[in-house]
Amino acid sequence: MRKKALYSVLIPLFVALALGMGGATFYTLRLAFRNPDVTWSLKNNPEPWEEYRDKQYKFYSSVNYKDHTSKAPEF
């Protein structure tokens, strides 16, 4: 009976641990697949940052990127 009570006390700890690990995994995968600084294939797209020249790729931004053009030179 005492072991059963001990295990029930640890359930919130395991739930919090699982949520933290899930959030960290989601964030890492989101950075790996959505960030323009990361490229997986240089042969297909040698300059991936050009694709995001005038796009908003951040989750939230107070600037409307549709009204602004990029000041970076085109290659």
Image (tube, helix red, strand yellow):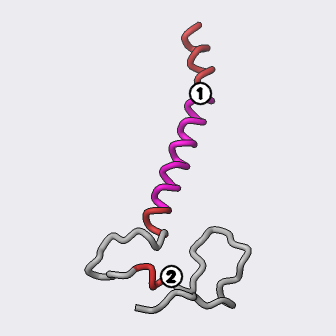
Asked if residue 52 lies in the magenta stretch, the reply is no
> Cα distance, mark 1 to mark 2?
44 Å
The type of residue carrying mark 2 is Tyr
Q: Could you tell me which residue is drawn at 51 percent across and 55 percent down?
A: 26
Magenta-colored span: 12-30
Q: Nearer the viewer, mark 1 or mark 2?
A: 2
Please tell me which residue lies in front, 56 or 22. 56
Task: Residue 45: give x, y in percent of width and height.
Answer: 33, 82
Which residue sits at x=67%, y=69%? 60
In-image side of 69 versus 62 (left or right) = left
Location of the C terminus by quadrant is: bottom left
Q: Nearer the viewer, residue 29 or 35?
A: 35
Name which residue lies at 55% across and 49% down. 23
Circle 2 residues within 10 Å: few <14, some 14–19, many ≥20: few
Q: Is residue 27 above or below residue 53?
A: above
Estimate how packed mark 1 is, as few (under 14), some (14 to 19) or many (20 or more) residues with alpha carbons within 10 Å: few
Residue 63 pos. (x, y %): 71, 78
Residue at numbered disc 2: 52
When asked about the image quadrant of residue 44, the answer is bottom left
Mark 1 or mark 2: which comes first in sequence?
A: 1
Q: Position of residue 40 (x, y in %)?
A: 33, 70
Q: Main secondary structure of the magenta part?
A: helix
10 with respect to 33 (left or right): right
Residue 3, x across and y down, in percent: 54, 10
Q: Is residue 17 magenta?
A: yes
Name the outermost residue toward the right: 62
Q: Relative to 49, is 18 above or below?
A: above
Residue position marked by numbered label 1 in the rendering: 11
| Label 2 SS | helix
Query: Do residues under tags 1 and 2 come within 8 Å of each other at their CB atoms?
Result: no
